[in-house]
Image (tube, helix red, strand yellow):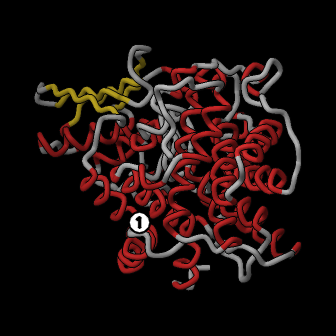
Amino acid sequence: MKPDSKADKGSISDQIVQFVCEFEGTAIPDDARHVMRLSLVDWVAVSVAGRNEPVARILQKIGEDEGGTPEAFVVGCSHRLPARMAAKINGTLSHALDYDDTHFDSMGHTSVAVIPAALSLADKMSTQPKAFLEAVLIGVELAVRIGAWLGLCHYHAGFHMTATAGTFGAAMASARILGLSSERTRHALGIAASMASGIKTQFGTMGKPLHAGLAAHAGVDAALLARDGFVSTHDGLEGEQGFSPTHHGAGDTGAFDGLGDDFVFERVSHKFHACCHGIHATLEALAILRERYSVQPEEIAELVITVNPQYLNVCNIASPVTGLEAKFSYRLVAAMFMHGHDTARIETYNDMICQDKDVLRLREKVIVATDAGISDSAATVDLKLANGDQHSQSFNLTDPMSLPAREARVRAKAASLIGAGEADSLWQKVGLGEQLPSFWIADQALT
C-alpha cells in the first residue's frame, strides 16, 4: 500500500519505516523509474572507468586477500566476496573519479552509497532487477530527504553528506532488499545512526571516495544485523541524543513533505564534465555563449565567473599545476573549454594542459567573483570581447532537463567512459531493466 499522506505522519523515523516497508513499487512514477535507470547506467560507467584507480586497487587487494563467502560481485575482482566487503569496494571505486551524480537538495552523492549496498545484497539474495531498482530508488530518495532534513548546517559543520545521509539511504535500501519487517527496519535505522560518519577534511584524498564505500558497507551491515535480531534504539535519528542533534542537524521536517507521493530524486544532477561539480554551471553557461555567439578564444578580453562564495575553497585553484588540481580550477577549466578541449573526458585533465600556453593566456583573463545571493547550483558568466561586445549568461543545474535530453547526455557520457558499443549494451540490459549491473559487467569481462 501507499502511505496515506493525509494521516498522522508520526515521527521522522515512523515515516521512513512506513515508506520502506509499505510503499508499493507499482506506485513509483514512470519518470522516477527512468531517472533511476539513468543513474544505474551512470553508476556502472563511472565504476568501470574507476576500477583501476589506486584507491580501488588497494581495496580490491584487501578484499581478495581476506576472501570469505562468495556472495556478491566486485568490480575489478576475479571472484565474489562477502556482501559487506563488496559494498565497500564497489562504493569506493564508483566515487574514485568523483564523476558520479549529485543531489543539491542534500549536497551529497547518493547513488555511490546506495546502489553498491543494494547490489551486493541483490547478488546475495538473487533479487530480480525490478525489485532491485525499486529498493535503490527508495534508498536514494531517503538519502536525499534525510540529507535535506539534516541541512546545510550539518554539511558546513564538516560532515560529508555522502557518508552520513548516504548510510541511512543504504541501510533502508538494504532493508527493502531483505524484506525486513517494520520492527526490524526500525532497528536497522537505529544501528545506522551509530555507523554514519565522514568528515570533509578528507576531500582531496582517498578518504573521500572511501566515504561512499563505508556508507554502503554500513548500510548492508545495519540491515543484516537487524535481520538477525540485533536490537537498537527506536529514535536513533531524531532522539534527544540521536544523530541529528549530536551532528548539527537542522531537523527540517519539511524535507519529508510528500514522501511517497513525489520523488525528489528525479531532480538529481548527473555530471557531464569530469571536474568538480561546482564548475559545471559555469561550463553550461559558457556552452550557451559559445554556440550562440560563435565566440573564439582569441576574441575574449575578459571572462568573469560569478558563483556562490562557498565554492572559493572548493574549486578555485587559481594556477593549478597537475591534472587533479585542474579539475578544481574555475579559471583553467573555463579556458580549456573555450579552447575546445573536451571537459567530459577524464584524460583531458592532465599535467600538460596546465602548461598549455594558449590555455594559460586565456586563463589570465578569467576572473572569479562571488555573490551570496546566487544558488550553490548556479553560475553567471560575463564575457567582454576585444571589439567591445558584452554578453552575459546564467545557468542553474537544477533547472529542469527533459528526459530525452538527459538520457542522451548520460548515454553519451557512458560511451566516452567505456566505449560506444559497451554503452549501448549497458543501456539495453541495465537501463531497460533486463539485468542487474553486476551481471552486465561480468558478461562484458570488465572485471
Q: Position of residue 419 (x, y in %)?
A: 40, 75
Q: Is residue 160 above or below residue 29?
A: above
Is 353 left or right of 392, judged from the image as shown?
Answer: right
Please give the name of the residue rendered at 72% of the width and 45% of the height, measured from the top-left corner: 185
Front residue of this view, candidates 229 and 102? 229
Q: Position of residue 131 (x, y in %)?
A: 54, 63
| Res 82 visible | yes
Residue 147 position by quadrant: top right
Is 447 left or right of 231, judged from the image as shown?
Answer: left
Please give the name of the residue rendered at 53% of the width and 28% of the height, measured from the top-left corner: 256
Q: Is residue 433 above or below residue 141?
A: below
Q: Position of residue 191 (x, y in %)?
A: 81, 42
The crowd level at tag 1 (other Cα within 10 Å; few <14, some 14-19, many 20+) is many
Residue 63 position by quadrant: bottom right
Under circle 1, the secondary element is: helix
Is 182 left or right of 430, judged from the image as shown?
Answer: right
Front residue of this view, candidates 98 and 447? 447
Q: Is residue 398 above or below residue 80?
A: above
Please give the name of the residue rendered at 77% of the width and 28% of the height, measured from the top-left corner: 235
Q: How many marks?
A: 1
Is 341 left or right of 221, judged from the image as shown?
Answer: left
Q: Position of residue 77 (x, y in %)?
A: 71, 77
Q: Which amino acid is tagged 1?
A: Ala
Q: Is residue 15 above or below residue 228?
A: above
Front residue of this view, candidates 387 and 188? 188
| Res 206 visible | no
In the rendered image, which residue does mark 1 sit on?
Answer: 414
